[in-house]
Image (cartoon, rainbow, N blue to C red):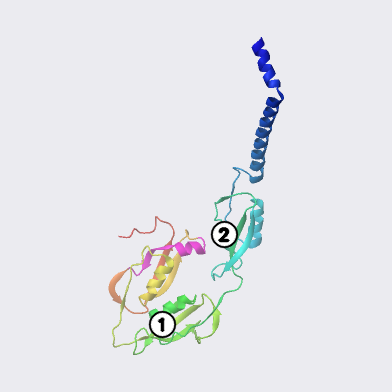
Amino acid sequence: MAEKTQKKGFFNHWIVRNLLICVILVVVMIAGAIIFLNVVTKHNQELVVPDFSNMTVAEAEAVASQAGMRVEVTDSVFVKRMKKGAVRDQNPAPGAKVKEGRRISLTINALNAKKVTMPNLVGLSMRQALAELQSRGLVPGRLIYVEDMATNNVLRQLRRNREIEPGVSIESETVIDLVLGLNPDSEASTYVPDLLGKRYMSAVDLVHKQSLNVKTLRFDDSVKDYDDSLNAMVYRQSPEASEIPVNLGDDVSLYLTIDPERIPARQ
């Protein structure tokens, strides 16, 4: 009985009582802070970033708003084969997990093409001219061979079958055809390279470097957009690769896909 009275008296002591009250208050405050932070930061409530590719900015804003996010255009590029003003890239990427209200940075396809200056390619070798075009953001077109004393020497530069003078301001990704010399006494020839498994741009570049032309580019149904085309690989070519000599300027057709089952394994 005396022991029980002693314990009761211990808890009734004002110092002990105040300490217990302080401990309880601290526990309550910590628990409240945790609950508050979980509510404010949406703890474990992450949202999945939508894919805004090829949307207009207005469409991206509407989709982002429904998803609990916001978008902002932070950069632009120009891709001629893509719809103007469409979303080209985004950060964070589609499928990433973010908090509600997160800002998604968008890169759009510019409304107006970037302007570049047409270089002087006359007198350069074919390979020098191809490198110069690519460095300016221009697209090598047809290689047109005419009789001349210097094989693969650039004689003229054409845009839409008309001569284009150096220094003219033109849109990036404009196609430029090259008129090249071919010495009939040199018996110059080339061969069709093995393009199977090569990516689109690499295959086209290799065709040109072999003094050949791309007659046809055909993408199968697996290629849905511009990004797919850049990643597409050659699964068939016509004519096939051969070390049998062919004429400079001959045509090669390329068939491309992103379906891994159609891409032949390289030896």
The C terminus lies in quadrant: bottom left
Q: Which amino acid does label 2 sit on?
A: Gln
Q: How far apart are marks 2 and 1 (CA)?
A: 41 Å
Residue 112 horizontal side relative to residue 132, left or right: right
Residue 244 percent across, percent down from the top left: 27, 73
Which residue is denoted by mark 2 in the rendering?
Answer: 90
The residue depicted at 47 percent of the width and 80 percent of the height is: 176
Residue 172's tag is none
Q: Name the residue under label 1.
A: 144
Inspect the magenta stretch and tell me whether residue 227 lies in it: yes
Q: Is residue 64 above or below residue 81?
A: above
**94 in relation to 116, above or below:** above
Mark 1: amino acid: Ile
Q: Mark 1: few, some, or many residues within 10 Å (few <14, many ≥20)?
A: many
Q: What stretch is highlighted in magenta?
A: 224-240
Of residues 11 and 180, the one drawn nearer to the viewer in this rendering:
11
Placement of 98 over or under 177, stated as above or below? above
Q: Which residue is at a point 43% across and 66% down the rendered structure image?
A: 200
Residue 73 x, y percent position in the rendering: 62, 63
